[in-house]
Amino acid sequence: NLSADIQKVSDRKNIDSEATQVKETSGTLRFYMASSPPEVDALVELAENTSSHVCEICGKEGTINDGPRYEVRCEECKK
């Protein structure tokens, strides 16, 4: 879980990490931080990249459909 991982890094480094925005844009996660160390930036980047190919419904491998709303779906959940 991204939030828990960010908290672990923040606790270990004794810093505050604050998300200023969390949203979905064009079918993928966007996570904006006020300030964050490189370790947190790497976690956020991994989560954002992963979100583009994990089905939002079941968690299996999926792809972004073309709309009218961008969503990541596996073949089963597209039906």
Image (tube, rainbow, N blue to C red):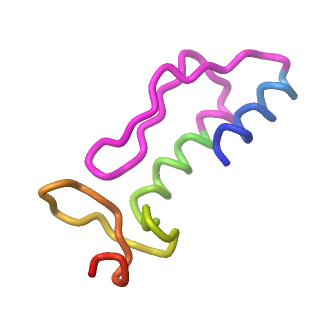
When the figure is inspected, residue 67 is found, relative to residue 2, above or below; the finding is below
Query: Is 16 covered by the magenta stretch?
Result: yes
Residue 47 or 73: which is nearer the viewer? 73
Q: Which residues are magenta?
A: 14-41
Residue 65 or 42: which is nearer the viewer? 65
Tell whether 75 sits left or right of 43: left
> In percent of the image, x 16 and y 63: which residue is there?
66
Furthest residue in direction left, as rendered: 68
Q: In this figure, what is the number of numbered marks?
A: 0
Residue 4 on image: x %, y %: 73, 39
Tell whether 5 sits left or right of 28: right
When the figure is inspected, residue 77 is found, relative to residue 55, above or below; the finding is below
Query: Is 8 covered by the magenta stretch?
Result: no
Residue 42 on image: x %, y %: 61, 41
Give the quadrant of residue 56.
Answer: bottom left
> In percent of the image, x 77 and y 26: which residue is there?
10
